Every structure is written in C-alpha cells, then in structure tokens.
Image (tube, rainbow, N blue to C red):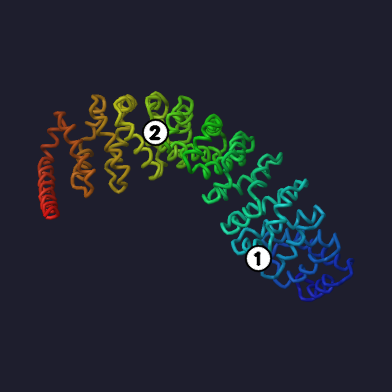
Amino acid sequence: MSPLGKDPLEALRTLAFSENPGLQQSAALYYLHMSQHMNVPLPVEHLEPFYALLRSADLEVQQMSSLSLVNFLLEGNTDKELVVQMGLLEPILDLLESEDPTVQCNSCACTMTLAVSESNREAIGAAQGVTPLLSLANSYDPRVQQNAVGAILNLTQSEKIQQVLCKEGALPVLALLLESPDSEVQYYSCAALSNMAANIQHHEAMLRPGNRFLLRTLISLLSSSVDKVSSQACVCLRNLAISADIQAEMVAEDVLPKLRSLLASGSKDVRRAAIALLWILSQHPHNQDTLTCAELLQSLGMLLSAHKTDPVIVGHTACIIKNLSLSKNRQRIIESLCVEGLLQTMLSTDIQEDCLRCVTSCLAELAKQEGATLCMVQRMDEPLTKCLVRLAGQLEHAEASFQAASIIQHMTGHEKMMLLVKRHIGEIQAYLKNFLTHQEIRFQQLGISTFCRLQEDPEFSLAFRKSQMAKLLEQVRQQTEETQELLRAAICHEDS
C-alpha cells in the first residue's frame, strides 16, 4: 500500500488529531520517516495533519513534526507558499516561543525556508514573526542562532519587512552578531545588513554620528579568514559608502591595506567584492591622492595581469585607474604596472564590450598626459598597434572605437608609433573616412586632428592624396560653414 494513499491519509488524520500523545507520536514518526526517504512531492492533503501535530502539547511530537516539515521544505517536496496558505505559518511561529532548543531550531529553519518568497515574507511580518526571531538570534544554542539569523537574512530581501525589522530593533542585534565566533552567523548577519544598507533610508540609523561601531566592525571583518564573510563585508561597506564623509572615515580606518590583501585572494568572489568597493572609494576626489599609492597601484597592475579575462576585475580596475589619473600623484600610475596591464588586457580575445570600453577610456585619459603617452609608446608593439587600429575601425562599438582612435592620435607624435602605424595605412584611412562623416561632432574633430598629425608624414600624405581624403575634408568644411550660417541666422533672429 502506498504511503500517500487514501487509507494511510485517513489513518494519519485520526492519529494526528487524537488527544492521545502516543497516537500523535506515531503520526509524527510516520511523517518523519517519509520526509527522510520520499523523493516525490507531498500531496497537499497530507499537509492538513501537520496543523494538529505542530499544535500538539507533546514535546516529541513538536520535535518530529517540525523536523519532518523542514525536510519536506528543504527537499522541495512541498510548495512553500502552499504551506502558508494551508494555515501552517501560525503554529510554526508559535513554536519559536518554545523553550526547547530542538523545536526552536526546527521552527527557525522552517521560517527561514519559507521566507524565500515575497508573499511569505509579508505573511511572516504580518504575523509578528520578526520579534521572536530577533530574540532567538541571541540564543546560546548555535543551531538555533544560525537558523534565526538565516531567517532574518531572508526577510531583509523585502523592503517592507526591512521597515518592520528596524522598528523592532534589528540593526543593533545584527551589528553585535558580526562579532560572533560562528562564521555562519557572521555571514548571515553581514548579508542581512548589506541588504538593509542597499536602502539609503536606513543609513542614518546604521551610522549614527559618534557611534561608528558598525563601520569599524565591518572593516575588521575584511581580515576574516572565511572568504564569504570578508566578501560580504566588502558588499556591506560598498552599500554604505554613499557619502564622501563615510568614505573618508573608511579610508581613515586603514581600509586600504585590507583591500589590497583581498585583491590577492584565491577567491573570485572576494577579489570582485574588494575591487568594487575600491571603485566606489576612487570616485570621490578627496580619496584619490590617498589611493594613488605605489602599493595599491602595484596590486592593481598585478590583478590586471593575472585576471585579464574577468570582466568584473578588468572593468572596475580600469575605472579606478581612470579616476586616479585625475589625482596629483598620477605620475605613480605611469611608473606602475597598470599601464602595461591595461594594454595587455586589450589583446585578450575574451574581453567583453563593456570592459573594452572601460579599458580604452582609461588609456585615452592617460594618453592626454605626455609622460603617460611616452610610457605607452615604449610598450607598443605590432600586436598592440594592430589591436588599436582594429578597435578604432569597429564603429558598431562607438565608445571603444572613439577611445582607441584617440589613443592612436596622441601616440603618433612619437617616431616609434608612427613607424608602427605605417603598416596599417589602409585601415587607418578607412576609419578616418568614417569619422569624418560621422553624425557626432567629436568623431569629426578627432578625425580631422588625426589627419593633420598623420599628413606630416610623407607616406601618409601620399596615401591621403591618392584616396581623395582632401575632397572629403572639403565636404566637411562646407557642411560646417552651412551650419555656422544657420546658427548665425538663428542667433540674429533670437536677438531681434
């Protein structure tokens, strides 16, 4: 006879709704056995007896029935939203008030698993499930504490429940749990705070003036030996680093040495989280001089060299270097491994368009400074030149095309670069023609300035004459004059 048949179900109902603890234990044991061995969905009608079992006054029944429900939920053998719809949430939350650690652990696990959907999170909040969870987050039983904080983490994915958590005093509870000796509790609480910090309206409560406990604790967690903890601490700090003042405090708390260490981590997630936080810190001018230190630039150069195909690493690193190139210490960038790393990244066949745009934009910004231009020219060779010319000709990737052409334009003032680009006269003429007829003025202007520089070379000058480039320039001149006439007319009409 099937354990899910009609007759066993009727027997289970009789046992579950009995007032005899021994009979209820039999039903609970039967469910526990099924939850450990069944690999098919539990029919909805089999959820009904759980109400009576979870409500039982017998401790063993509570322990077994709550554990079997956890098993069913974790194995995906029952629909999580259906459990709430069947009215089982109320007895589950009531069990959070139990004095038995096993029942507390199981009911917390049930709540944590149910809280993965938005409708269930709202139902838990509406049923006042937040308060007992916060209480159990301070439990001395590590299993209970883990599951309680895990449930709170899932609840923080709802902005509506975040408000409830704040009102119930969740922030100081979670902040203190960051110092837990249990790395799992540290991770859950840090991730929950990260979710809260993603909502700027919570920042004032999280970072009260005169009390920077949370900030200092998060920075200390960057040194955690557990990768997911240090990674999540980076995420939380990044979400909090909205204002220049908070960023300045982070830098003042010696966050940079810790982030440099994380950049060398063997974990991809840790490296990505660290570089993303550095990118945020590099955006504000008052941080740029401090960040432009030889040690950090060395780390960034090595990072590019080792992970040139990682889009997150490459994109963020290029943006950081571009931001730092605006500092008074920009000479340190030229002297570091960063320029070499950026140039070599362009040669990667796996680099994505967004990353390519970041890299070329960074190099183009650096190329505006003569010292950096000379440094780039010294590192140029045929593969890199070919790559830049090819990118300049790919107008379907407009930004990368423009920036690549800008890099070429700045470097052709040097003899070595001129010798290298002479091997690509045809390709350069092709993209210059496209630039001169482009709808964007900046492309036309870059095309003209590049033409002026290149035509000083006899070989380019001859090639331009043969390709009727002068005729194309004349067309651009006429269009420009017509535009100027129209502008004058418009301005005179406005003045009158």
Q: Where does the image place residue 107, in percent across and percent down from the top left?
A: 74, 58
Q: Residues within 10 Å of mark 2 (few under 14, many from 20)?
A: many
Q: Residues within 10 Å of mark 1 (few under 14, many from 20)?
A: some
Is residue 248 shown above or below 2? above
Classify the position of the N terminus by image quarter: bottom right
**Residue found at x 53% / y 35%:** 250
Which residue position is annotated with label 1?
Answer: 79
Q: Secondary structure at mark 1?
A: loop
Report the front residue among 142 and 458: 142
Residue 52 placement: quadrant? bottom right
Q: Is residue 463 left or right of residue 382?
A: left
Q: Secondary structure at mark 2?
A: helix
Tag 2: amino acid: Leu
Is residue 367 shown above or below 24? above
Residue 38 numbered tag: none
**Residue found at x 55% / y 32%:** 253
Residue 219 placement: quadrant? top right
Q: Is residue 333 left or right of residue 194?
A: left
Q: Where does the image place residue 102, in percent across and percent down from the top left?
A: 80, 54
Q: Are marks 1 and 2 in contact (CB under 8 Å)?
A: no
Across the whole image, how many numbered discs are drawn on residues?
Answer: 2
Report the front residue among 336 and 181: 181
Classify the position of the C terminus by image quarter: bottom left
Q: Is residue 307 left or right of residue 22?
A: left
Alpha carbons under labels 1 and 2: distance apart? 50 Å
Q: Where does the image place residue 451, in percent across and percent down from the top left?
A: 17, 36
Residue 370 placement: quadrant? top left
Report the front residue among 370 and 289: 289
Which residue position is annotated with label 2?
Answer: 342
Q: Where does the image place residue 482, in percent across and percent down from the top left?
A: 10, 50
State which tag comes first along the sequence, 1 or 2. Answer: 1
Tag 1: amino acid: Asp
